[in-house]
Image (tube, rainbow, N blue to C red):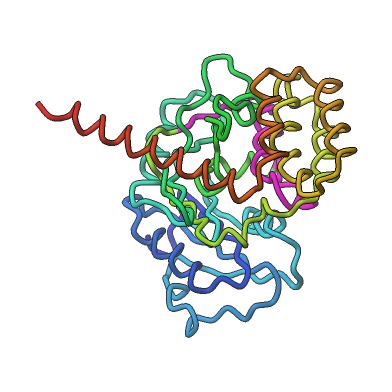
Amino acid sequence: MSPDASPLISVVIPTRARRAALARALRSVYRQTETRYEVIVVADGPEGLSESAIPELQHEACRVIELPQQRGGNAARNAGVATARGHWVALLDDDDEWYPHKLEQQLTASAGLSCAAPIIGGRVVVRTPHASFSVPRRGPGPGEPLSEYLTVRHGLFHGEGVVQTSTIMTTRELLLRVPFDEALVRLQEMDWLLRATAEPDTSLRVVMERLAVWHQEDQGSRVSDIDDWPSTLAWLEQRRDYFTPRARAAMITSTVADMAATTRDPRVFARLLVLAFRLGTPRPLDLATYLQIWFLPRWARRWIHDLTLGYRDRRMRSLGRRRSVP
């Protein structure tokens, strides 16, 4: 696209000290079959990003914004959205990448929605040290509360609903009206999705095609490894009206428990179990999940989770190939 043309889509990429990964993310944007875009790279704090260090920044559609101090990924996203010129904004984390048809398929999906501010997600390929698999397994069901789609598990080691940040595309107007919460360190996309879909004339559509690759090979760099469970619990109580009782119980017995279990403190174990019943309505599977989180080490749970989903993904692809053979 000519730099003088008005872009249809603004691609916002927050970045911090990941030059090789950023270059990979940018290359995945430049391979898109839909080319009516601009790219806004937002450096979260002074980094001195240069075209000599990252040649991909030389692309005519790309511009760089550098925040004067480090403020976090959400602040960087909001800063990018504030300068965006496109009707649509597509988010991409600097350590992820897109499939070439990503933007084109999301534009096609948006055409079938009548609301003014649709939110389009999609499937993402998760790559971990143990396996590679695609999530989500399904989109939200008819009438299914979004909080339950994102939190309620249907298996002991995994759920079914995911809307990962690098798959999100929505209107610039909605992101300006409902910005990302800059105080949050984790659960950023869940928080934004719950608040955004509560706005009038919005809807969520999940494209059941692989749109992005979510790199988790380096498990030590996961934001989800930040074990500040009191802050997460406080966030849940603050946002409790966005959750059904079933979803609140699922959050406490899975996400909050995953962080709190590193304390190995029986008082914390008892406190969260009581809160799960006080704030929500836990199911037997929630209680089983809670017990396995407390009594299995995190590395073992992740290993089982990744291998289980990797096996399921391979099996589904194999069945799909067999069915396609005449």
**Magenta region:** 177-206
Q: Is residue 261 within the magenta segment? A: no
Q: In this view, does 283 lie above or below 62?
A: above
Q: Is residue 180 within the magenta segment? A: yes
Residue farthest toward the front in the current orientation of the protein:
295
User: Front-most of 235 and 292?
Assistant: 292
Residue farthest toward the top in the current orientation of the protein:
143
In the picture provided, is 26 more to the left or to the right than 204?
Answer: left
User: Front-most of 62 and 168?
Assistant: 168
Q: Residue at x 65, y 78 (%)?
A: 47
Residue 270 picture location, percent across and down: 86, 32
Residue 1 picture location, percent across and down: 37, 60
Q: Is residue 325 above or below residue 88?
A: above
In the picture provided, is 169 more to the left or to the right than 240?
Answer: left
Q: Is residue 193 above or below residue 6?
A: above
In terms of image quadrants, where is residue 161? top right
Q: Is residue 204 above or below residue 132?
A: above
